[in-house]
């Protein structure tokens, strides 16, 4: 019999928090969501904010004290903003690190190992820099064994996931070199639930708008990961683009590889590397696209070698699922092997 897992989701009103709630509800009786926190919406039914959960749950948003969250929870998901997540989660981690309880954070506050790098890219001094060495970067395709026993998971960024998965196989193979060039387009849901100038969907629905060009905060976590994987690269040239869709990321990655390979050779490298990764589809017969993975934890990747001998990778994923909540829930599944989350495998819609 599967042991009941009690879960709290902190910051549950946003898109990331809503996706966690949606996915966890597909686990049925194996999971009980005990708290979906919100300071401003306490007492409001969750289904008022996340209408896809209407008549599925009678859960209400709440604002319990930290002591109550700790007492009631086996797993705590943080879906809080960058810069503020660590202030909330660090004291909780202090209390749980010697117990069986787990914290999984979706923000950028624990992804980087170097506090100076964190301050440079997030313009914020980390309140607990010593914890950066204790957090495990939640990339299952690289850190699966460390995730199994982790107490604090730093779930990767959405753009970072598309870049990581595009580069990891050749980084581990030891053939990645130079400065990878990345252009990636993302849906409006990646900007969060609160409308802002330049990110509100009506203002972007008829255009493609580059932003944070060569200055996106996901770059250092990608560089950090491929270096841990064995690559010597020290930078990535990244241009993110706001696209007129709601969900999805499509990344185009071009990089130097140090040895002459043909397309079939690199396809074999990717197939081998992802052979045990159930959510990664290495394509050879069509191009990756966002519609075919929308709402799921699946990723489509197509690697090639250009006529000039450079690596060319297309990668498509759902920014809210594999690029956010789904990858965090996937990490929970690695920690709890008997736990089944059918929503991660749901085939989505077409078109």
Image (tube, grey):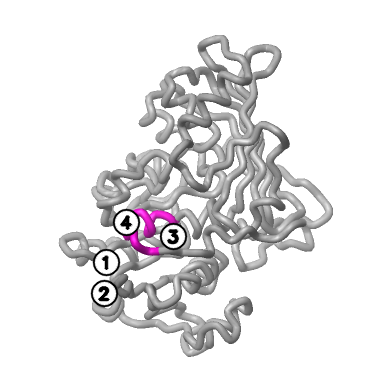
Cα–Cα gap, marks 1 and 2:
7 Å
The residue where tag 4 is placed is 335
Give the quarter of the image for residue 100.
bottom left
**The magenta stretch spans which residues?**
328-339
Residue under the image location 40 percent in, 44 percent down: 118
Q: Is residue 239 among what the camera can see?
A: no
Percent position (x, y) of residue 127?
31, 55
Dot in front, 1 or 2: 2
Q: Which residue is mark 1?
A: 92
Q: Quadrant of the C terminus?
A: bottom right
Question: Residue 334 colored magenta?
Answer: yes
The furthest residue to the front: 1
Whichever of callouts 1 and 3 sits on the residue coming sooner in the sequence is 1
Asked whether the beta carbons under mark 1 and mark 2 sit within 8 Å of each other, the answer is yes
Q: Nearer the viewer, residue 312 or 61?
A: 312
1 and 4 marks in contact (CB < 8 Å) = no
Of callouts 4 and 2, the N-terminal one: 2
Q: Nearer the viewer, mark 1 or mark 4?
A: 4
What residue is shown with label 2? 70
Instruction: Tell me which numbered mark, 4 or 3, is placed earlier along the sequence.
Output: 3
Element type at marker 1?
Answer: helix
Q: Can you tell which mark lies on residue 140? A: none
């Amino acid at each position: 019999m599967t042991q009941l897992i009690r879960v709290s989701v902190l910051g549950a009103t946003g898109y990331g928090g809503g996706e966690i709630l949606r996915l966890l509800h597909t686990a049925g009786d194996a999971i009980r969501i005990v708290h979906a926190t919100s300071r401003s919406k306490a007492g409001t039914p969750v289904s008022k904010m996340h209408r896809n959960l209407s008549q599925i749950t009678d859960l209400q948003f709440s604002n319990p004290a930290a002591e109550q969250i700790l007492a009631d929870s086996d797993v705590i998901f943080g879906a809080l903003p960058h810069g503020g997540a660590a202030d909330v989660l660090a004291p909780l981690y202090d209390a749980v690190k010697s117990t069986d309880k787990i914290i999984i954070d979706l923000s950028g506050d624990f992804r980087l190992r170097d506090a100076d790098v964190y301050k440079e890219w997030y313009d914020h001094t980390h309140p607990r820099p010593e914890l950066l060495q204790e957090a495990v970067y939640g990339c299952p395709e690289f850190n699966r064994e460390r995730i199994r026993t982790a107490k604090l998971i730093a779930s990767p960024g959405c753009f970072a996931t598309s870049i990581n998965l595009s580069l990891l196989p050749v980084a581990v193979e030891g053939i990645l070199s130079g400065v990878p060039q990345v252009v990636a387009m993302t849906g409006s849901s990646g900007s969060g639930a609160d409308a802002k100038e330049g990110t509100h969907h009506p203002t972007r629905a008829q255009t493609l708008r580059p932003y944070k060009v060569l200055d996106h905060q996901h770059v250092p976590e990608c560089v950090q990961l491929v270096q841990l994987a064995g690559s010597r690269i020290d930078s990535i040239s990244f241009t993110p683009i706001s696209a007129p869709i709601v969900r999805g990321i499509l990344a185009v990655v071009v990089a130097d590889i140090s040895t002459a390979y043909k397309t079939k050779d690199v396809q074999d490298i990717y197939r081998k590397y992802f052979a045990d990764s159930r959510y990664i589809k290495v394509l050879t017969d069509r191009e990756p696209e966002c519609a075919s993975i929308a709402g799921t934890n699946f990723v489509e990747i197509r690697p090639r070698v250009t006529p000039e001998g450079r690596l060319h990778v297309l990668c498509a994923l759902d920014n809210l699922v594999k690029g956010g909540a789904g990858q965090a829930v996937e990490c929970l599944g690695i920690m709890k092997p008997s736990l089944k989350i059918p929503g991660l495998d749901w085939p989505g819609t077409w078109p």
